[in-house]
Image (tube, rainbow, N blue to C red):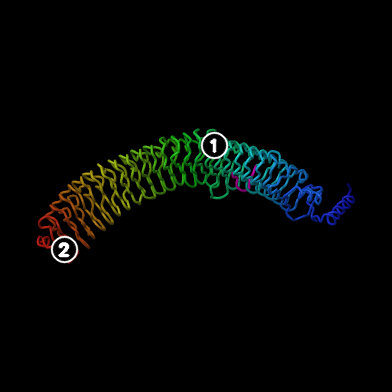
């Protein structure tokens, strides 16, 4: 066609469109349409008559400008052949409440849709196998929802790109998703949710990128997800990047075998499978990982992962017996293992050196020690260890030099020994060791020099031989029934605030504090049933604000405090029935200066303030 003929052709076409069909003046030649219809109104099909009327008006059209909605509203439409000529739709496509058809065959020639596809509440639909097999570009989302008899999705075979999301959910009979074979990119999220009979997702075999999140949830019979074997990256934010919840996925054969990056976190929850978990082995970037209540007998995988930006959480009573994964993980922002009932062997994490946040280990039923942390050198957060029924020793953390947070160990009913943390030197937080009913020995912590608050409260503790280099604590509380002498505190020089020795029913002497020079706040010695004297406190010379000496039935003398220079505020000595000598210089001075002196119900010469004053020289 020469130039003159082309000009005549286009002028004729424009004239026809304007006068007969009121067509759009701008012709998109790239869409290769034969006749372009310019109606910008939405097209709503509720009945066969609506199709017949549309056919009269747009019999030569292959493009729709506006939304197309087919919703029979309780009736039946079986012949959709009128739509077989359409190639382009500039709007949303909605198929809703279709009855009497088992397979979609409405838009087999459409190549471009500039809007969303919604296929919902179509009770007789059993397959989406051939429709949309010419669709190459979708500038919108796909939502296939509540189609109760839909069994398979094999369509969308040439579609390469979806600019928004894909939602396949609440299709009660859906068994297989095999379509989307050439789809490489999803611009939004991909959600496969609550399809209770779904067993396999083998489609999406060319998919390499999902811009937002991938959620596969509540598909209780889903075992096979080979369709995601070529997926490389997911997510572009800090939200949950991949969430796999309440499925039965077989993770034994390296599912997601090419996935390297998740912007956001990975969560696998309630996966009802007894196979070995061995997947995500190329993953090298992820914000955080949570594996919760997965029944896999062994949790392995994650071989390519060197660090995480956030947590690694292993959680839940249904968690399997063995944890062998994460063998090349060097650093994690937090490590939390808790509420596991069956987990008893942890041999993973053997390269882990740094926990850049807290370590929490609690309510685990069968784990006996922390040998899996033998390579860890620093924990930049708190350490909480509590309510672990089988934990017999806090051991295995022998190379930890830094902990930037409190250490709290409590209510571990079978814990007998704490012998870790001897290399710990960089520490300035609290250590709270409480209510471990069977704890007998504390031999660790021999490298630290300072603790903010140190609290040791146990009924049958026999020895505290750790803390050999401890020089300063802000506050110290010791309470137990069995220790005779605290030899571990022989280098303690200063308690900046309060020293509280309470209910030490086997304590015979205080020689473990022989180098203690100052208590900056309150000194309390109370309910020590066999303590006879305060020998061992002779170096305690700096002024003390307040002293309580109460209910020590065998105490006969307090001469161990004789070098104390001053009591600033008050002294309270009561119910020490054998104490007969209280007239030390600091108490006498406090009486002379009309300080607060409460002395009663002790032995002779120490029963009242006046008796003590009479013995003062």
| Quadrant, the C terminus | bottom left
Instruction: Tell me, yes or no, whether the two marked residues, 1 and 2, touch with CB atoms within 8 Å.
Output: no
Frontmost residue, 53 versus 206: 53
Residue 185 lies in the magenta-colored region: yes
Mark 1, residues whose alpha carbon is within 10 Å: few (<14), some, or many (≥20)?
A: many
Q: Is residue 97 in view?
A: yes
Residue 232, by quadrant, is top right
The residue indicated by pointer 2 is 589
Residue farthest bottom in this picture: 594
Residue 39 lies in the magenta-colored region: no
Residue 515: x %, y % from top left? 23, 50
Q: Is residue 210 left or right of residue 609?
A: right
Disc 1 is placed on an element classified as loop
The residue indicated by pointer 1 is 249
Disc 2 is placed on an element classified as helix
Residue 315: x %, y % from top left? 45, 42
Frontmost residue, 272 versus 232: 272
Above or below, 466 relative to 614 = above
Frontmost residue, 558 versus 617: 558
Magenta-tinted stretch: 184-191
Residue 74: x %, y % from top left? 68, 47
């Amino acid at each position: 066609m020469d130039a003159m003929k082309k000009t005549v052709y286009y002028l004729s076409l424009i004239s026809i469109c304007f006068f007969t069909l009121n067509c759009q003046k701008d012709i998109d030649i790239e869409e290769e349409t034969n006749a372009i219809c310019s109606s910008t109104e939405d097209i709503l099909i509720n009945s066969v008559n609506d199709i017949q009327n549309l056919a009269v008006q747009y019999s030569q059209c292959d493009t729709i400008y506006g939304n197309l909605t087919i919703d029979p509203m309780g009736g039946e439409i079986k012949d959709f052949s009128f739509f077989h000529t359409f190639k382009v739709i500039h709007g949303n496509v909605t198929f809703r409440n279709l009855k009497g058809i088992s397979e979609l065959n409405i838009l087999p020639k459409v190549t471009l849709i500039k809007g969303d596809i919604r296929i919902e509440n179509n009770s007789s639909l059993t397959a989406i196998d051939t429709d949309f097999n010419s669709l190459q570009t979708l500038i919108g989302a796909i939502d296939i929802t509540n189609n109760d008899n839909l069994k398979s999705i094999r369509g969308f075979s040439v579609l390469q790109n979806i600019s928004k999301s894909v939602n396949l959910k609440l299709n009660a009979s859906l068994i297989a998703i095999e379509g989307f074979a050439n789809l490489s990119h999803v611009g939004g999220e991909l959600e496969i949710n609550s399809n209770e009979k779904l067993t396999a997702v083998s489609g999406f075999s060319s998919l390499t990128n999902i811009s937002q999140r991938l959620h596969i949830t509540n598909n209780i019979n889903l075992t096979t997800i080979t369709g995601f074997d070529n997926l490389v990256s997911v997510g572009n934010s800090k939200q949950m990047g991949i969430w796999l919840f309440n499925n039965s996925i077989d993770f034994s054969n390296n599912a997601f075998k090419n996935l390297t990056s998740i912007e956001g976190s990975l969560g696998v929850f309630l996966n009802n499978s007894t196979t070995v978990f061995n997947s995500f082995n190329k993953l090298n970037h992820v914000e955080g990982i949570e594996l919760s209540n997965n029944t896999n007998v062994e949790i392995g995988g994650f071989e390519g992962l060197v660090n995480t930006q956030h947590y690694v959480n292993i959680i839940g009573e249904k968690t399997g017996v063995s944890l062998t994964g994460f063998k090349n993980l060097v650093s994690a922002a937090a490590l939390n293992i808790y509420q596991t009932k069956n987990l008893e062997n942890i041999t993973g994490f053997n390269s882990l050196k740094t926990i850049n946040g807290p370590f929490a280990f609690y309510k685990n039923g069968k784990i006996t020690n922390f040998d899996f942390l033998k390579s860890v050198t620093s924990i930049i957060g708190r350490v909480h260890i509590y309510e672990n029924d089988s934990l017999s020793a806090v051991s295995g953390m022998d190379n930890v030099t830094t902990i930037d947070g409190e250490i709290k160990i409590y209510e571990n009913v079978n814990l007998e020994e704490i012998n870790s943390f001897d290399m710990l030197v960089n520490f300035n937080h609290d250590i709270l060791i409480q209510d471990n009913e069977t704890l007998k020995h504390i031999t660790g912590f021999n490298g630290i020099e300072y603790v903010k608050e140190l609290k040791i409260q146990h009924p049958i503790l026999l020895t505290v031989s750790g803390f050999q280099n401890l020089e300063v604590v802000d506050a110290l509380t010791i309470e137990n029934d069995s220790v005779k002498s605290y030899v571990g505190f022989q280098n303690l020089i200063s308690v900046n605030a309060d020293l509280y020795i309470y209910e030490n029913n086997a304590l015979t002497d205080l020689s473990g504090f022989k180098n203690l020079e100052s208590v900056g706040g309150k000194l309390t010695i109370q309910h020590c049933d066999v303590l006879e004297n305060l020998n061992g406190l002779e170096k305690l010379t700096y002024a003390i604000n307040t002293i309580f000496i109460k209910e020590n039935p065998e105490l006969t003398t307090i001469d161990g405090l004789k070098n104390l220079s001053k009591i600033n505020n008050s002294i309270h000595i009561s119910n020490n029935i054998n104490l007969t000598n209280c007239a030390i210089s600091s108490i006498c001075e406090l009486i002379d200066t009309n300080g607060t002196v409460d002395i009663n119900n002790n032995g002779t010469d120490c029963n009242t303030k006046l008796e003590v004053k009479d013995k003062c020289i």
